[in-house]
Amino acid sequence: HCLYFVTPSNTQPYLTTKNKMDVTDKKYRMVAFDLDGTLLGPDHEISDYSVQYLRSLHQKGLIISIATGRSPAATAEVIRRLNLEFPKPHSEGFPVVTTNGAKGIHVCHDTTVHEVEEKKAGDGNPMIDGRMKVTELFHQPVPLELTKKTLKVAKEIGCVTNYYIGHEIYAHVLNDWHLEATKKYSNLTGVDFTYCKDDYQEAMAKGLPSKLLVLCEPHSIDDTYHKVEEALGHEAKVIRGSPPFFVEVLNKIVNKGSGLELLCEKLGVDISDCIAFGDGDNDIEFIEKSGLGVAMKNARETLKNVADEVTEYCNREDGAIRMLERLESEDKLYFGS
């Protein structure tokens, strides 16, 4: 494919704010993808075309990774579809940054099992029922007092909160709209909820959450974001969600960029050797800290403003994959151990 990077007429091209060195001869040995709005299409599925191309890059030696706001279990279907073989010289398993940088994991599963057999083995989530082996690389949860404050604020403004602990997501629903909102999120990610009636006491007894997610109506996303941010101040990292029907609350030191740094450190890869693709506000640090930060054509303007490049094609058109094809044709990808 012949790709071009375009900007609207009478505007400046999107340029990086990172003052990077000349990368004319730079080669990248790793790529990290956001999922929803980036690697996945509008149907929240990865295309067959993307699967085949990423498998070929993996076999050649490029490190393929995911960096997402989703919980670990909500990445399982994408990992299963990609079906990459491990271990490799560069990694014991599929490297993943989850919950917007709060947790990093390696994932391994039996890639010799045929897809039909895999489905017969169980309809449950393979990461939860043990068909996928998960090794935690790092974890930076939300502190206890911040957790309590967030749950209180969400309740006061009439919202329901997702509480992420391990592979579970707890929710205390108080009305029909709360239930509808959690089902909408479940349909998006493929993860089931654990519904509680004890104001999250059972969840808190299990441990601190990787993140908290305040669900809201799409039309009230900005109002909800400002209310949560104002209430929590500088105690937390507060993110406007994408798709826009939730607000995320994280440990204040956590973001996808710091998560990518920790993942690269675990893999023995310099972050300057990593390409990052994203589309949302939660991808800003992720894009800024990577060696080559790429915003999708369908990305928010806030992300395009800090990206090194913007894809010509959107996620519906496999825009990230088509850019990787261009980089490979330009000999910008490093295949090695």
Image (cartoon, rainbow, N blue to C red):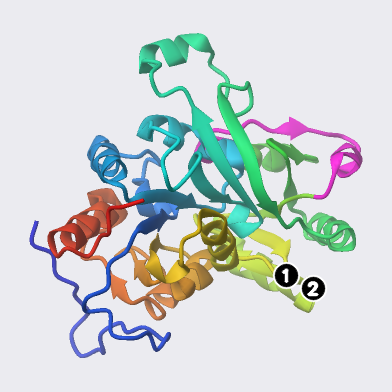
In this view, the residue in front, 207 or 62, is: 62
Question: Looking at the image, which residue is at 37% across and 12% down?
Answer: 116
Mark 2 surroundings: few (<14), some (14-19) or many (≥20) residues within 10 A: some
Up the image or down, 288 lies above or below 144; here it is below
Up the image or down, 208 lies above or below 109; here it is below
**For the residues marked 2 and 1, what is the alpha-carbon distance in whole angstroms?**
6 Å
Query: Residue type at mark 2?
Result: Glu
Give how far across and how far down residue 85 sits, in percent.
Answer: 39, 32
Residues in magenta, as a range: 184-208
* Mark 2, secondary structure of its residue: helix
Up the image or down, 55 lies above or below 302; here it is above
Give how far across and how far down residue 299 sits, in percent.
Answer: 38, 66
Would you identify the image quadrant in which residue 5 lies? bottom left
Up the image or down, 90 lies above or below 123; here it is below
Is 86 situated left or right of 333 in this image?
Answer: right
On residue 235, the disc is: 2
Give how far across and how far down residue 84 sits, in percent.
Answer: 38, 34
Q: Say whether disc 2 or disc 1 marks the residue closer to the N-terminus.
A: 2
Contact flag, marks 2 and 1 (Cβ < 8 Å): yes
Q: Is residue 193 magenta?
A: yes
Question: Looking at the image, which residue is at 74% across and 53% down?
Answer: 159
In this view, the residue in front, 86 or 219, is: 86
Query: Residue type at mark 1?
Result: Lys
* Mark 1, secondary structure of its residue: loop
Would you identify the image quadrant in which residue 24 lies? bottom left
Mark 1 surroundings: few (<14), some (14-19) or many (≥20) residues within 10 A: some
Instruction: Quarter of the image for the N terminus: give it.
Output: bottom left
In this view, the residue in front, 316 or 278, is: 278
Residue 317 appears in the figure: yes
Residue for badge 1: 252
Question: Looking at the image, which residue is at 89% across and 37% down?
Answer: 202
